[in-house]
Image (cartoon, helix red, strand yellow):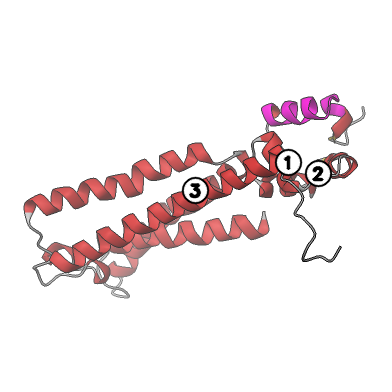
Amino acid sequence: MKNRLKVLRAERDWSQAELAGRLDVSRQAVNAIETGKHDPSLPLAFRIARLFEMRIEEIFDDGDHA
Amino acid sequence: MSPKTKAAAPLGPGEERSRQRRRRQWMYLAIAGCMGGVIGGITGFYDEGEGNLFTGGAEAMTLPPLLALAIAAGLLAAFLALPLYGFRLIDDYKRERNLVAFTGGCLAVIAGYPVWAVLHAGGFVPKPHAFGVFAIAYVSMTVSFLYARWRL
């Protein structure tokens, strides 16, 4: 699943470790989500959305726009 | 200001939490390693029989009864309590990789034991033994974990 996590993180000048700590996950998890290797669980997606004060679909794109 | 005299930037709250998480994880690994070393060392030191756990001769091992009970408790802690506690420490991503590892170990035993048994029946390999089955599970689990870590 595509996402804007890396861009949003860069806009705030946060490292992966900084974002990981704010989300209470490992840095490897942030890296895996950013590179599209891992889709976050729904609770984590909500935490990400709240942290960036956006809606989930503004951050994640499953490519299904039907 | 030269790089040597430049003050280090203060850690953000997220960076600090990430460091704590890493410290906790290393502590967990150190405790697991120590437990394994102590259990293995004591078992090897006090074994009074002719058997060897690593060559399939576990039935010929003998240990003082109280020590055997203590080692059994230690093994339960190391192979059951500690991993279950570890699952609570890690996040969804790492839990997923660990589940791949456990699945690999489980499937290897389910497929490996009958294959080993029929190969023994055909005279190709020695009789299946408990440590061999344990080793199949452990090695497969490790290989599956490494696969999940680098490929998934």
- Label at residue B12: 1
What is the chain letter for disc 1? B
Residue at the (35%, 41%) spot, across then down: B81
Q: Is residue A52 magenta?
A: yes
Residue at mark 3 to residue at mark 1: CA–CA distance: 38 Å
**Rendered location of residue B131, percent (x, y):** 28, 62
The residue mark sitting in front, 2 or 3, is: 2
Specify the segment rendered in magenta. Answer: A43-57
Dominant SS type (magenta): helix
SS for callout 3: helix
The residue mark sitting in front, 3 or 1, is: 1
**Rendered location of residue B29, percent (x, y):** 45, 54
Considering only vertical position in the picture, is B3 above or below B98? below
Q: Circle 3 is placed at which residue position?
A: B103
**Circle 1: residue type:** Gly
Residue at the (51%, 46%) spot, across then down: B24
SS for callout 2: loop
Q: Determine if marks 3 and 1 fall on one subunit.
A: yes
Considering only vertical position in the picture, is B151 above or below B76? below
Whether residue B150 sits left or right of residue B70 in the image: it is: right
Q: Circle 2 is placed at which residue position?
A: A14
**Rendered location of residue B38, percent (x, y):** 27, 60
Residue at mark 1 to residue at mark 2: CA–CA distance: 9 Å
Label pair 3/1, CB-CB below 8 angstroms: no
Q: Pick out the residue farthest to the bottom.
A: B124
